[in-house]
């Protein structure tokens, strides 16, 4: 098991000005790292519960998308990098794309799965630990939370089907005492839920085996904040070298 703590990255951002990213085509990207695959999820707008929208998560995905497909950086084939933002970041599509990775990213492949959005915890008798963790999707419905979030056990099960030699999971969820609306009003979570980083048990399951790594935006007891960085900046500050397999390493 390989578990990484990105604390050293949370206080810095990888500044990536727009002009540094030339238009990338499948032809040019394929000269780079053809065995790289990625699923990038930025929940963005939650129209059924607009108070939980996070528009900046879409920016995160677009910047990381550019990093991965730029032939001078990670060099992934653009056809191997799938992004889900706003309305497409729903339960069905997320599950379908994880299945796509399980079917296509096999053998000597590297897979990156990135999720940017809310992560919530609730108490449940269905879990041995008494707690359940979920990733909030764009179709969040407060009258049907059970069916409009991705529960951790299902997320782990889908990831476990990916047999690629290397799997990097990046979970950029917030851990804060309370969220504040643009008007300065505190936004409360649904009753019984708490905003938190992924449970340790989730990290344990995701990190099983060789070639598996998990990075979270913050650890328990820390906070992950949203900030208006300059255009083209990735808030999480992910090192590009983590996204590409090098024969020398």
Image: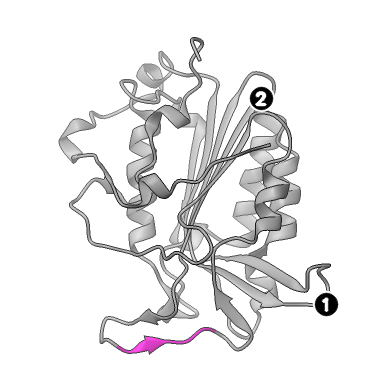
The residue wearing badge 1 is: 125
Residue 81: horizontal and vertical position, in percent?
48, 35
SS type, badge 2 = loop
- Upstream in sequence: badge 1 or badge 2: 1
Residue 191: horizontal and vertical position, in percent?
60, 89
**Numbered tag placed on residue 193 in the rendering:** none
Q: Main secondary structure of the magenta part?
A: loop
**Numbered tag placed on residue 165 in the rendering:** 2
Vertical position of residue 93 compared to residue 14: above or below? below
Query: Which residue is at a point 37% across and 41% down the rendered structure image?
Result: 64
Query: Which residue is at a point 39% across and 39% down the rendered structure image?
Result: 65
SS type, badge 1 = loop
Vertical position of residue 157 compared to residue 24: above or below? below
Query: Which residue is at a point 71% across and 56% down the rendered structure image?
Result: 201
Closer-to-camera residue (164/47): 164
Residue 223: horizontal and vertical position, in percent?
42, 66
- 147 is within the stretch colored magenta: no
Q: Quadrant of residue 51?
A: bottom left
Q: Quadrant of residue 238?
A: top left
Q: Which residues are magenta?
A: 185-189
Vertical position of residue 79 compared to residue 204: above or below? above
Q: Residues within 10 Å of mark 2 (few under 14, many from 20)?
A: some
Query: Which residue is at a point 57% across and 85% down the rendered structure image?
Result: 190
Vertical position of residue 192 compared to residue 148: above or below? below
CA distance for labels 1 and 2: 35 Å
């Amino acid at each position: 098991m390989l578990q990484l703590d990105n604390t050293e990255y949370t206080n810095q951002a990888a500044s990536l000005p727009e002009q540094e990213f030339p238009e990338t085509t499948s032809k040019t990207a394929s000269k780079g790292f053809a065995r790289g695959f990625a699923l990038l999820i930025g929940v963005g707008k939650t129209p059924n519960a607009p108070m939980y929208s996070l528009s900046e998560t879409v920016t995160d995905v677009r910047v990381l998308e550019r990093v991965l497909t730029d032939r001078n950086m990670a060099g992934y084939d653009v056809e191997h990098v799938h992004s889900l933002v706003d309305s497409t970041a729903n339960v069905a599509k997320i599950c379908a794309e994880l299945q796509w990775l399980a079917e296509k990213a096999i053998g000597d492949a590297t897979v990156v799965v990135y999720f940017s959005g809310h992560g919530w915890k609730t108490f449940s008798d269905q879990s041995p630990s008494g707690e359940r963790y979920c990733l909030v999707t764009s179709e969040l419905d407060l009258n049907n939370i059970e069916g409009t979030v991705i529960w951790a056990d299902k997320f782990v099960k889908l990831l476990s089907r990916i047999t690629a030699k290397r799997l990097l999971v990046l979970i950029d969820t917030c851990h804060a005492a309370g969220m504040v609306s643009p008007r300065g009003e505190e936004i409360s979570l649904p009753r019984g839920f708490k905003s938190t980083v992924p449970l340790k048990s989730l990290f344990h399951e995701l990190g099983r085996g060789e070639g598996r790594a998990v990075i979270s935006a913050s650890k328990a007891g820390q906070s992950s904040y949203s900030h208006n960085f300059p255009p083209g900046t990735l808030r999480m500050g992910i090192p590009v070298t983590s996204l590409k397999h090098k024969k020398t390493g």
